[in-house]
Image (cartoon, rainbow, N blue to C red):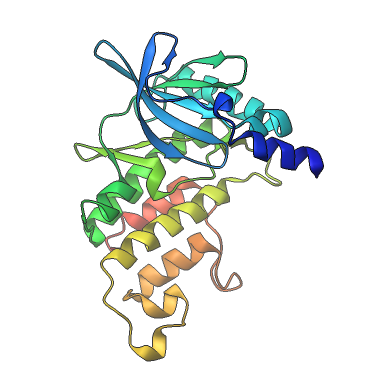
Amino acid sequence: MVVLDKLRASWYDKKHHLALGDTIQNYTLIKQIGEGRYGKVYLGINDTTKVIIKQLKREAFLRSPEKIKFELETLKTIADLKDPRFPVYLGRFKLEYVRGFIFDFKEGDSIEYLLCHKKVRYHKPEIREFALQILDMLEVLHSKNIVHKDIRIPNLILHKGKLSLIDFGLARFIDNKRYKTELDFWYLGDFIIHLLYYVYDTAPKSLVDKPWYKQLDLTAQELYFLKRLMRVERKTHPKYETVAQIRNDLLSGEIF
């Protein structure tokens, strides 16, 4: 515990941080664009080429090296796909006090930014289209034995109507024990519910403390679909086994 406290304290030491204006492999850091559990994310530029530079927290690479190893292996597997919807791993860097990864830059805005800052609202037909795009990406990842485990609004980038999926820090190789495809299906359901709430009218007082499936205005088919994704009322709502099953239901014309 003492060691962990020291590691956390060291995170506030400036020498363990990158700073705007620093140069990493000829890329100058011009903007911090995010911070997560395992590090900070910066926008870097070299002439006209933009990249993403992810600085790992000292605690992450000293206390959880196996997680960093998993992320690196996953990134290399994804890079081999040469699929523009996923991050392209460009390499890693190791300085005296700082380590991290370099990725290509994805044009567009995160769904989180669009919802929270630009106040964009998505209705059922658009949500359905997003879900279908996410399923297409999951089909590719699952075929490579990868489960993403973090399909959230900050990690989905929208550009000209097309989604990209970023941040594979929690991704793992599927073992059908702890890491299963149904984890990604749960996150898909959570993503859909999240977007539905942004166009949701305030509930009557009698529903304020009720769960989402009591509050949201959903048809019986939509409710059944989301409960299957979210593993709610499992005895009467069997889980989805494959991406194809989910896609077929979305294309049935009865959902969203």
Q: Residue furthest bottom?
A: 206
Q: Residue furthest front?
A: 14
Residue 25 position, x and y percent, is 44, 9
Residue 155 position, x and y percent, is 41, 42
Q: Is residue 61 above or below residue 117?
A: above
Q: Is residue 200 above or below residue 187?
A: below
Point out the image quarter for the C terminus: bottom left
Side of 210 where 161 appears, left or right: left
Residue 21 position, x and y percent, is 37, 19
Q: Quadrant of residue 47?
A: top left
> Across the whole image, how many numbered discs are drawn on residues?
0
Side of 250 where 72 appears, left or right: right
- Residue 33 visible at all: yes
Q: Nearer the viewer, residue 52 or 80?
A: 52
Residue occupying the point 50% across, 45% down: 150
Q: Nearer the viewer, residue 18 or 90?
A: 18
Point out the image quarter for the N terminus: top right
- Residue 135 visible at all: no
Residue 69 position, x and y percent, is 65, 25
Q: Quadrant of residue 30?
A: top left
Q: Nearer the viewer, residue 256 or 48?
A: 48
Q: Is residue 129 above or below residue 29?
A: below
Q: Quadrant of residue 199?
A: bottom left
Residue occupying the point 43% across, 49% down: 152
Q: Residue furthest right?
A: 2
